[in-house]
Amino acid sequence: MEKPTGPIAIPAQIVVKDLADLLKISVNEVIRNLIAAGVFASINQVVNYEAAAKVATEIGYEPEEALVAVPTGAAIRPEAATIGAKTAEQGRIVRPPVVTVMGHVDHGKTSLLDAIRNTRVAAGEAGGITQHIGAYQVEVNGRKITFLDTPGHEAFTAMRARGAQVTDIAVIVVAADDGVMPQTQEAIDHARAAKVPLVVALNKIDKPGANPDKVKQQLADVGVVIEEYGGDVICAPVSAKKGTGINELLEMLLLVADIEDLRANPNTRAQGVIIEARLDKNTGVTATALIQEGSLKVGDTIVVGTVSGKVRAMFDDTGKRIKKATPSMPVGILGLSEVPEAGDILTEVEDEKAARALLQQRRNAAAAAQNAISLDTLYMQMQEGKVKELNLLVKADVQGSIEALRHSLSRAGTETLKVRLIHDAVGNVTETDVHLASASKAIIIAFNVKVDGPAQRVAANEGVDIRTYTVIYKLVDDIEAALQGLLEPVYKEQVDGHAEVIQTFKAGKRMIGGCKITSGKLTRSSRVRVMRGGKEVFNGLIESLRRGKDDVREVLSGFECGILLEDYNDLQAGDIVEAYSMVRV
Ligand code: GDP
């Protein structure tokens, strides 16, 4: 872009957003320049002429103070002029951002979290020794940032699958000497599916093999376009090992937080999410909660997941006892009778009675909540307006299959319903995939790959639909059929029982098999196949099933019976009659 020049009139006070419009640059850029000038303001805050002029000069303008009229007319907006008045009225004040660090293995997530934590120790804060409670806070320029201590997208997505979204910003760590790797891509997809803004930490820039430009290009190739390349993703070069660039990264996080305008009301009842919990021999149940709204105080009655309790004591991430925890603060809580799970929602209630009522309500809601989507029910949910996007997560055997699937799926969808690929990768379907699908209400497509055991269990628990395909057109057909409500249900054969033919009887032209049920049961309506020497010699229906002279509906294992098959009179002693049914899957 051409560098702006010439004089520009700036009012005595101007809202950051309007300043961006006036200077024809992004809000990002304004806030960053303000920070450089030592002014910390968010998108809707007002800055004075002096600060605005510094930004304008930096960009290349020659600022001068507007004496009478305001060029954009914005700074005189009453709600903007009285800074924060409206939000203060609602009691919602700026809260620290909550940040999760994700990225490929060995790219330096743990090192980065350590380096960030050390910035505080270096600042000589009391104690200096951090308590591992699953999260910690650091202070930058007098403002706080909360970091979740479990790096990686598994925890992030598992929590989200439980309905808890705690992260405001995702830091994607990419090693400058290694570049975008499969888990980098996964992390990006997970953050995107959660609609969480990204900041790239380009790590290991101290290494001789570091090639930042190459990595930036790779990021652009996967759709993460950094500012330098004309996009809006901030990229901070760092060395977790040497501690370089850490402060700049932290400042960038504050910048993104300002753009997101994160707020909470500290003066209401507390609401939070459990991020870690354990049973301690000495202190009993210790749970770490991240407070999201309100303030939690010692003595408060709380409901956590499906248990209630009273806050007996609290401590912060330095192990210091505290009496009150405010929004975005991670806090250790003593006083629960059972160990809650990560992702459980914490709610402060008035008293025991309210706690009981809420628990009952949660149980009812849990019973009613089956919010997973399956391809079978898609049309119905579409009609009810419950889905507007069909989210798919694709795992395939080779990259080529993914490309082909992407291509075919890009043409699927209707005017009212879009097909969106939230993640694709080569490999089996894993538990993490299922969590991501569950959190994003997505259907998993397994193309020529297997579903891991744990993934199968979680999918069954959470009602995630996993569909296995070996040919692309079948998959595309199914999706299109589902969009039109025409999907044929899928049936699977289920063996119900076996009978062995002991001897045969002739009755006119018909042949009756005198059988013994050796497993399961046979029912009158069973479909059966007759196996002789390992080969199927008949496949059809039962005409009648008899015990003695009586027609019966079913015969159980261990009993004998007479079987007459429809249109079949060649039963022989030693034949195995296998009963099966087709069940809908
Ligand atoms: P994680 O698996 O992403 O948590 O990665 P780690 O933090 O465990 O780091 C993996 C390896 O990279 C370790 O041997 C670190 O010492 C090394 N490492 C991490 N950050 C840097 C860095 O900035 N520069 C260099 N040279 N090595 C680093």
Image (tube, rainbow, N blue to C red):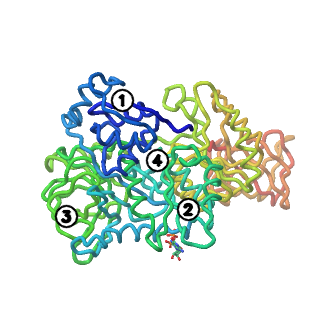
From the image, tell me which residue sits under label 1: 9
Determine crowd level at label 4: few under 14, some 14-19, many 20+ residues with C-alpha closer than 10 A.
some
**What's the amino acid at mark 3?**
Met
Q: Position of residue 129 (x, y in %)?
A: 28, 76
Q: Quadrant of residue 429?
A: bottom right
Q: CA distance from mark 1 to mark 4?
A: 34 Å
What whole-number distance in Å separates the C-alpha atoms at marks 2 and 1? 42 Å
Q: Are marks 2 and 4 in contact (CB under 8 Å)?
A: no
Q: In the structure shown, which secondary structural element does the residue marked by tag 1 occupy? A: strand
Q: Secondary structure at mark 4?
A: loop
Comes first in the chain, label 2 or label 3: 2
Can you identify the residue that label 3 sits on?
314
Spatial CA distance of label 4 from label 3 is 31 Å
Q: Give the number of the disc on residue 197.
A: 4
Comes first in the chain, label 4 or label 3? 4
Reply above or below: 191 against 335. above
Judge whether 363 appears above or below 69 on screen: below
Judge left or right: residue 170 versus residue 296: right
Pair 1/4: label in front? 1
Q: Residues within 10 Å of mark 2 (few under 14, many from 20)?
A: many
